[in-house]
Image (spheres, rainbow, N blue to C red):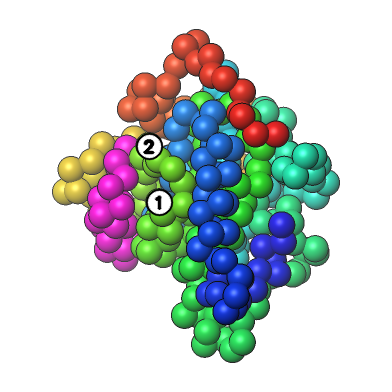
Amino acid sequence: MSPAHKRYRDITGDGGSDVVGQVTAQQARLRERMAAIRSVVAVVSGKGGVGKSTVTANLAACFARDGLRVGVLDADLNGPSMAKMMGVRGRSLVVAGGAIEPPASRLGVKVMSMDLLLPSDDAPLTWEAATQDEAYTWRGTMEANALREFLADTRWGALDVLLVDLPPGTDRLATVASVVPVLAGTIVVTIASEVAHLIVKKSITAARQARARVLGLVENMAGLFSGPDGARLACEAGIPLLGSVPFDRAMAEAADRGESFIERAPDSAAARAMLAAAAAVRAALALRSSDLPLAPPAVD
Ligand SMILES: Nc1ncnc2c1ncn2[C@@H]1O[C@H](COP(=O)(O)OP(=O)(O)O)[C@@H](O)[C@H]1O
Ligand SMILES: [Mg+2]
């Protein structure tokens, strides 16, 4: 697969190829590949820069530390950051039997990101289209297609949870929801600012429209901003507050080094907040590491 070179014609039809048939076949392969994944959870915000990727990376580490089998899909195709944050950036991909083996972090979290496929550090993902206007018009469709390809070609194996790190934008969850077989829930991330809350509220509505259960809200960078707090937003939106994670420079530094913050500073307030949020998510999903014997995936 080469989503980096995805062609506009591949998706919109080129007057001969059976595009609908291809997508249907790919969707079937995706279902098989994902058959041994117990729950897919999307981390959303609507707003950029609030810490979706940081929360995703830390939740994944918390789950893995507790013995769950965890995967992370970086659905931010244009600004991928999970490979770097999870310390797998630059790892060469193993392709076997037509599938990509996602590299695993030190804690065993399997990571799949566009970053692992792009040829160089400064190469952005570009959509090949006849004109830039067309690329813009078809962006959602192309993203859905690239994600479908990703998921159809990645050998996750058996997972208890697959966390999907979304790009900013309130429409992105609908794209992911249209591709994955079942979305077990969403985790909404915000910061204490009115601007963030305005957009996050739209994301909560979008999650409900996508029939994705909102597992709760994580307030991030607590203490840094003086706007309305997460507890108020959670209360207004009628969703649980999963935790309030303080701003901690060591957390950003760990992310930059690809290290697991919860292992480095397990007693910090930020790590404890992440662990509590992870426990709340597990409880909401009823995920226990003991009762999970799943058949290996049918495809190789
Ligand atoms: N609680 C926190 N304390 C300190 N830095 C944080 C915290 N959460 C996120 N950051 C930093 O803020 C920046 C943006 O976070 P990121 O997770 O990339 O946001 P998003 O995915 O929502 O765009 C990153 O540099 C990250 O390391
Ligand atoms: Mg991000």
Evaluate whether residue 132 shows in this view: yes
The mark nearer the N terminus, 2 or 1, is 1
Q: Is residue 220 above or below residue 117?
A: above
Q: Nearer the viewer, residue 256 or 171?
A: 171
Q: Measuring 45% from the left and 32% from the top, which residue is drawn there?
A: 39
Q: What is the three-letter code of the residue carrying label 1?
A: Ala
Query: Where does label 2 land, which residue?
Result: 184
Tag of residue 177: 1
Decide whether residue 211 is among the magenta residues: yes
- Kindly tell me whether mark 1's CB lies below 8 Å from ligand 2: no
10 Å crowding of disc 1: few (<14), some (14-19), many (20+): some
**Picture coordinates of residue 223 (x, y %)?**
39, 47
Q: SS of the residue at dot 2?
A: loop
Q: Measuring 56% from the left and 51% from the top, which residue is drawn there?
A: 25
Q: What is the three-letter code of the residue carrying label 2?
A: Ala
Q: Nearer the viewer, residue 299 or 18?
A: 18
Q: Measuring 52% from the left and 84% from the top, which residue is drawn there?
A: 134
Decide whether residue 274 is among the magenta residues: no
Taking the image as shown, residue 91 lies to the left or right of residue 26, namely right
Q: Measuring 44% from the left and 43% from the top, which residue is drawn there?
A: 181
- Kindly tell me whether mark 2's CB lies below 8 Å from ligand 2: no
Location of the N terminus by quadrant is bottom right
**Picture coordinates of residue 296 (x, y %)?**
61, 23
Kindly indicate the quadrant of the structure image that contains residue 246. Answer: top left
Q: Nearer the viewer, residue 95 or 119?
A: 95
Secondary structure character of the magenta stretch overall: helix
Magenta region? 195-218
Contact check, label 2 and label 1, Cβ < 8 Å: no
Taking the image as shown, residue 268 lies to the left or right of residue 198, namely right
Q: SS of the residue at dot 1?
A: helix
